[in-house]
């Protein structure tokens, strides 16, 4: 089992391009980028070579900025290269949360920006020729009658208040494309979709390199020195720049304590079955959509290009993998697809995503020239690219759109470093019990 924060102990020249996963074994790795050595002057220095950092770097380089990206491990090493691959509009919180925090009008603007994030993702894939297995379509599915009512009401609300059409499928309609008796209905979004996460990260990196961005891998930032020209220091060098961007999410490790206190690393896991064959895979999910239930501890799944079932979930709020994880994932798969009881799991991997206390995005500035984006709360495949673009816009002098996100209030997790994880585990136990009982 791999974790996002697990360090590599191999020599730099022999370190793997990515943690072990089906993703790593099914895409061409990016060539190793050199570690930082010595001092570099730049216009912008970015911490983190995931979707957010690479997206900001690409936009800035195309605008003529000299950009350096510092990555502690390899490109896409964290959540960007290990996630479930489901790209959706919206954020980790419900629209009602943003309405309560900022009002209806601002919440509508934020949702429209999230739709822009999905279109930006599609545009970048097409413009840069990124082979990342994009497929249209996503369904949120209901397990219990209460969830049917909530999904139908939510779809109506999105159409009326947000101008966003979604399709309601009853059980019979859903059953026609999804071969599972577990679900009672679905809200289908034809504008959402799914992709190969690591291939997309590598494609973004190749586009950024072609635009002139310098990426230094195996260059963990040990200190951020704020000032007129911020400095990011590693063990063997430093970058001095006019602007700094923090895009480390769950892996800051002391770089900016005021940011770390407002996110919590949460473990999440994905299994890949043995190949099912084209006929069996198509019978399972006939329209090749991605699927996620709406339980608090959710299951999500889709098909791979080689006809595997990619099945994710089982979030760990204690930062420890669930006990007997392989058996747990097999049991979850059989609950959804009992007809796959004979199909083994061939890959199982995991890592950490960052969640904010209210599950809303946490983007903004630490100082006038130090920007950040975090708190994607398991909903970052599309919104990370949006965050990168808005930070690039702000550095270029157009900060209005980023400033709207900066208005979202974020409190630190209660309990500090010692108690915040146990308190979160207790809270999540309640939500899991609610999912199980009604």
Image (cartoon, rainbow, N blue to C red):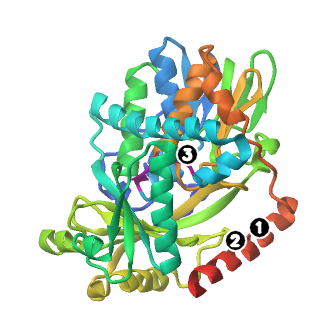
Magenta span covers which residues? 85-91
Numbered circle sitting on residue 241: none
Secondary structure predominantly adopted by residues drawn in magenta: loop
CA gap, disc 1 and disc 2:
6 Å
The secondary element bearing badge 2 is classed as loop
Q: Nearer the viewer, residue 371 or 152?
A: 152
Residue at figure coordinates x 66%, y 47% from the top left:
98
Could you say where residue 378 lies in the image, as x and y percent from the top left?
A: 55, 56
Could you say where residue 278 lies in the image, as x and y percent from the top left?
A: 14, 68
Q: Is residue 412 above or below residue 303?
A: above
Q: Nearer the viewer, residue 171 or 125?
A: 171
Query: Label 3, on which residue?
Result: 73
CA gap, disc 1 and disc 3:
25 Å
Residue at figure coordinates x 52%, y 68% from the top left:
150
Q: Is residue 404 left or right of residue 184?
A: right
Q: Earlier in the sequence, mark 1 or mark 2?
A: 2
Could you say where residue 291 lies in the image, as x and y percent from the top left?
A: 37, 65
Residue at figure coordinates x 66%, y 75% from the top left:
431
Q: Is residue 384 above or below residue 334?
A: above
Query: Label 1, on which residue?
Result: 421
CA gap, disc 3 and disc 2:
23 Å
Residue 285 quadrant: bottom left
Residue 288 in sight in this render: yes
Query: Label 2, on which residue?
Result: 318
């Amino acid at each position: 089992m791999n974790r996002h924060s697990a360090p590599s102990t191999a020599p730099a020249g022999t370190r793997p391009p990515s943690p072990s996963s089906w993703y790593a074994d099914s895409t061409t790795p990016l060539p190793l980028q050199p570690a930082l050595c010595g001092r570099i002057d730049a216009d912008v220095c970015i911490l983190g070579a995931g979707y957010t950092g690479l997206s900001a770097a690409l936009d800035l380089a195309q605008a003529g900025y000299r950009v350096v990206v510092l990555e502690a491990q390899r490109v896409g090493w964290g959540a960007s290269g290990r996630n479930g691959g489901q790209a959706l509009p919206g954020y980790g919180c419900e629209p009602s949360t943003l309405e309560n925090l900022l009002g209806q009008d601002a919440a509508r603007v934020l949702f429209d920006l999230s739709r822009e994030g999905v279109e930006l993702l599609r545009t970048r894939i097409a413009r840069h020729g990124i082979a990342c297995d994009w497929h249209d379509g996503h369904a949120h599915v209901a397990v219990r009658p209460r969830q049917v009512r909530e999904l139908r009401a939510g779809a109506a609300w999105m159409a009326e208040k947000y101008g966003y059409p979604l399709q309601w499928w009853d059980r019979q309609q859903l059953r026609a494309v999804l071969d599972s008796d577990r679900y009672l209905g679905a809200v289908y979004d034809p504008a959402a979709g799914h992709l190969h996460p690591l291939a997309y990260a590598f494609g973004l990196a190749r586009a950024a390199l072609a635009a002139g961005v310098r990426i230094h891998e195996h260059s963990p930032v040990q200190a951020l020195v704020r000032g007129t020209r911020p400095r990011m220091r590693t063990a063997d060098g430093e970058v001095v720049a006019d602007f700094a961007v923090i895009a480390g999410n769950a892996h800051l490790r002391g770089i900016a304590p005021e940011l770390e206190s407002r996110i919590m690393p949460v473990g999440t896991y994905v299994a890949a079955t043995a190949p099912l064959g084209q006929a069996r895979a198509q019978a399972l999910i006939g329209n090749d959509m991605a699927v996620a239930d709406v339980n608090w501890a959710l299951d999500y799944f889709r098909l791979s290009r080689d006809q595997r079932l990619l099945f994710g979930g089982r979030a760990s709020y204690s930062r420890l993998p669930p006990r007997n994880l392989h058996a747990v994932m097999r049991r979850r798969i059989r609950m959804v697809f009992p007809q796959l009881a004979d199909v083994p799991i061939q890959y199982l991997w995991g890592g950490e995503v960052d969640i904010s206390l209210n599950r809303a995005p946490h983007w903004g500035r630490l100082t006038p020239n130090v920007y950040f984006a975090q708190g994607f709360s398991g909903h970052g495949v599309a919104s990370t690219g949006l965050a990168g673009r808005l930070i690039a816009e702000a550095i270029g002098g157009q900060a209005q759109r980023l400033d709207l996100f900066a208005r979202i209030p974020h409190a630190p997790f209660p309990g500090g470093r010692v108690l915040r994880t146990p308190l979160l585990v207790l809270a999540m136990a309640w939500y899991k019990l609610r999912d199980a009982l009604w």
